[in-house]
Image (cartoon, rainbow, N blue to C red):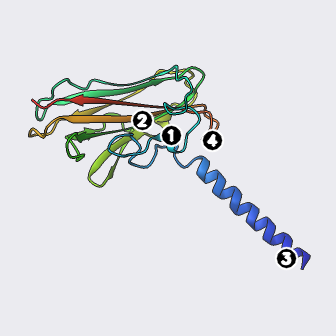
């Protein structure tokens, strides 16, 4: 009887350790879709909740979407860069989507230009671009770290479009604590 109880304890402990390890590393290749902060999406702060805009703690780093035109031209290709920096952090992530401001539907097409560092997932017809495992650039202390891709504007005018992004400046310890979460949005107006 005693051996049986010990065996159950060992099995339970092993299962918990395996689950815990898989949770710690579950999102090293980016969060699942819908963590941009736009259109009722969550942000990375859903899990990484130590430091974000709602925590009341200072965010002394930077997070920016660069290259969004003030006004888009249908069918035109625009290089877009997402950049993040945060003192003392050393692992990085982001997620971005581009949607019609009025409807929330996909606006144009996100085109990967660096498949080593970025990947696109699709959820309910909307593209979400994030970093890959290599794109997390672990070990780059303080940043800035950036990811570049192309955005092909819609072929026909679909009203103003909005870029929503969330970024994670992580401490690299594999836990959800001690990470800084940023958000940014930019609007490209219809011609």
Q: Quadrant of residue 149?
A: top left
Work out how far the residue at label 4 is from the one at label 1, CA to CA, in angstroms.
13 Å
The label nearer to you, 1 versus 2, is 1
Q: CA distance from mark 2 to mark 4?
A: 18 Å
- The x and y percentages for residue 129 are 35, 41
**Distance (Cα) linking label 3 and label 2:** 49 Å
Q: Which tag is nearer the camera, tag 4 or tag 1?
A: 1
Report x, y in % for residue 57: 57, 26
Per the image, the residue denoted by label 2 is: 166
Q: Which mark is residue 175?
A: 4
Q: How many angstroms separate mark 1 from mark 2 (CA)?
A: 9 Å
Q: Residue furthest bottom?
A: 1
Q: Along the horizontal axis of the image, is 50 left or right of 72?
A: right
Q: Position of residue 118 (x, y in %)?
A: 39, 38
Quadrant for the N terminus, please. Answer: bottom right
Image marks 3 and 4: residues in contact by CB distance under 8 Å: no
Residue tagged by mark 1? 45
Q: Quadrant of residue 95?
A: top left
Q: Residues within 10 Å of mark 2 (few under 14, many from 20)?
A: many
Q: CA distance from mark 1 to mark 3?
A: 43 Å
Residue that badge 3 annotates: 4
Q: Which residue corresponds to the image point at 15% horizontal and 26% vertical from the top-left? A: 71
- Residue at left 52%, top 23%? 59
């Amino acid at each position: 009887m005693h051996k049986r109880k010990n065996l159950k304890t060992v099995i339970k402990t092993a299962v918990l350790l395996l689950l815990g390890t898989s949770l710690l590393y579950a999102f090293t290749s980016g969060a699942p879709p819908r963590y941009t902060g736009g259109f009722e999406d969550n942000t990375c702060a859903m899990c990484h909740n130590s430091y974000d805009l709602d925590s009341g703690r200072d965010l002394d780093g930077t997070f920016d979407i660069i290259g969004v035109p003030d006004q888009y031209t249908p069918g035109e290709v625009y290089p877009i860069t997402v950049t993040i920096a945060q003192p003392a952090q050393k692992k990085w992530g982001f997620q971005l989507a581009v949607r019609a401001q009025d409807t929330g539907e996909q606006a144009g097409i996100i085109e990967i230009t660096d498949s080593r560092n970025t990947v696109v997932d699709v959820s309910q017809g909307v593209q979400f671009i994030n970093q890959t495992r290599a794109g997390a650039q672990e070990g780059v202390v303080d940043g800035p770290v950036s990811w570049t891709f192309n955005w092909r504007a819609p072929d026909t005018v679909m009203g103003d479009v909005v870029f929503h992004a969330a970024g994670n400046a992580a401490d690299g310890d594999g836990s959800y604590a001690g990470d800084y979460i940023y958000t940014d949005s930019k609007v490209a107006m219809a011609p």
